Amino acid sequence: MRNYRSVALTMFLAVNGALGFGLRSIAPRGRAALVTSSTSIFSTAETSEKAPEASADKETAKDTVAATKPIKNEGAYDNLKMEDIVSLCKRRGIIFPSSEIYNGFAGFFDYGPLGSELKRNVKDAFWRNFVQCREDVVGIDSSIVHNPTTWKSSGHLDGFSDPMVDCKETKLRYRADQLFCAPVVLEECGSTVGYVCVLEANDEDMVKAAETQAKKMLKEADKKGAAIKPFEFKDLTQVTEEEMAQIPSPGSNKPTLTMPRDFNLMFQTNVGAMQDASSVAYLRPETAQGIFINYKNVLGTSRAKLPFGIAQIGKAFRNEITPRNFIFRSREFEQMEIEYFIPPGDDVWQPFHEQWIKNAREFLLSVGLKDELMGYDVHEGDGLAHYARACTDITFKFPFGVQELMGIAARGDFDLRSHTEGSGKTLDYYDEETKEKYIPHVIEPSLGVDRLILALICSAYAEDEINGEKRNYLSFHPSIAPVKVAVLPLVKNKEPLVKAARGLFEKLQRRWNCQWDQTGAIGRRYRRADEIGVPFCVTVDFETIEEDGAVTIRDRDSTEQVRIPMDDVIPYLSKAIDGY
């Protein structure tokens, strides 16, 4: 009976399109040690090749596993375009354009079934890392609409703006610091033919767009083919009126742009039945001020002592002039911020600032960002806010260029002092050790949920080759993957097998978000799981119910498999997913 079942199983799998099946020695019943499966599905690739001959030879099985090991495409990220990411997100239910049935609404996005799970996992990971696992940080959840005086005191009413330019012909608006111009200078004589103007992007794309404009300009000037000097780009906040008169608008291709002017980014609303000046309020443009105005409440109720921090995750709204690059810059987004309060002093803040930079990078690595895609941008001189002592951004190499991902700023006492003056309430701290009263200074680690999700999707994108077949998949870290486990009954028409698989699936559901998939060839089901980043697939087969009571667990990235008793599945996955 045992040989008959093994041969029948091999024939079934070969017919159904899954490659690399063979036989293995059956492990003893009960809680056996983990055994690398040489008989389960060795590869997810679906080709027309035949399955290996049935054999009980362990060495032959090992050879088969080695032969089907994925060959990773190390250069896949360099060729990744934002269009690929946007298409994948929509196709697989991660992120949709908001109000799509009404032709969308620029700057707003909706998270689908997988995206909402991914978002929740990212926020949970942040909270667990920086609040639950620390004794010096507590959390709050403040309202989105504050007393409008809050924004007067914080400086947002007068100074929270971006530089904007208008195209007088097309009526389009652009952020001046996201438009870059450069003179087209002839190599031979050094004369300037005109100016090119391109939108901010990675260096290669900006140069390519500028070259296209320059070629057209040279042709119109009867200097086709003339050599030009390398482009020296600067954004439109740095140009003079004389230069602006020569810079073409991206909308009209003519010099029709206005000089930059400030545009306040806050969304205005009205509170109450009356709509007059007394009812004006604002949707918060950041979550930080909700922390500062609750500082005294938290200090009095949590028995906190300096240094300590207050964390918050919540929605923020900014009326961006030109939302772009998918969810990187949108008008509605979520922030994860911490205000870490420390004693004043020139010799105090630097060690805290450096430690938070280190902690921030470690967190980003722990959720799956690739180290080689991250960098640092240290703000200096005019790049610093007027109140900041220091600010370091952790950057990420997106497909559209290197951009800020997470900022860690030493903000001094500007915020608490401003709210003390604006409210008339004292927001100082009494230090029992030094017997002093002072307004604490602040270190602020700030991270956008949506930006981190975009970085995680980009970082997780991977390509490899198995048996000559190309595979695209998302290599999410198990802790943040939207679906942790896919349970796959080998066939859907054998009731005892399906019942056993279903029982395991329902147990796993109590711990993690899991997927049930019983349709199609096993290789095809593996590929579906791979594309949405499911880290583990559990296959329940004939031997599970008739011989060893064990299942096969397949790893997404390596495609390696282990055969373990069903009772050991949850401990095994818990270690792999949760780390304990």
Image (cartoon, helix red, strand yellow):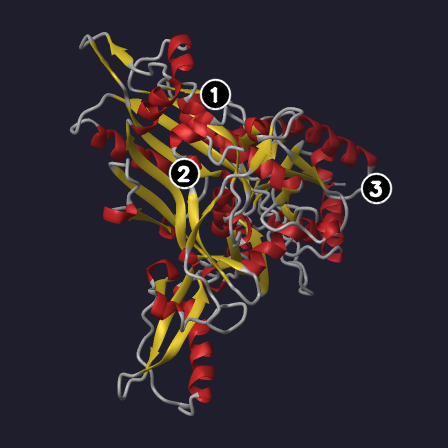
Eye-nearest disc, 1 or 3:
1
Q: Residue at x 67, y 53 (%)?
A: 91
**Dot 1 crowding, Cα within 10 Å, few <14, some 14–19, many 20+:** some
Which label number is shown at residue 158?
Answer: 2
Q: Secondary structure at mark 2?
A: helix
> Outermost residue, left direction?
347
Q: Residue at x 70, y 35 (%)?
A: 544
Q: Measure how far apart labels 1 and 3 are at the Cα level.
A: 51 Å
Closest to the observer, 431 or 249: 249
Which label number is shown at residue 493?
Answer: 3
Quarter that holds the N terminus: top right
* 511 sits to left or right of 475: right
x and y percentages locating residue 219 in the rendered image: 45, 88
Which amino acid type is shown beneath numbered disc 2? Asp
Eye-nearest disc, 3 or 2:
2
Q: Measure how far apart labels 3 and 2 are at the Cα level.
A: 68 Å
Closest to the observer, 409 or 405: 409
- 78, above or below 350, in the image: below
Asked if the residue under mark 3 is in contact with the one under mark 1, i.e. CB atoms within 8 Å, the reply is no
Whichever of labels 1 and 3 marks the residue nearer the N terminus, that label is 1
Q: Residue at x 57, y 38 (%)?
A: 118
Whichever of labels 1 and 2 marks the residue nearer the N terminus, that label is 1
- Per the image, the residue denoted by label 1 is 140
Whichever of labels 3 and 2 marks the residue nearer the N terminus, that label is 2
Eye-nearest disc, 1 or 2:
2
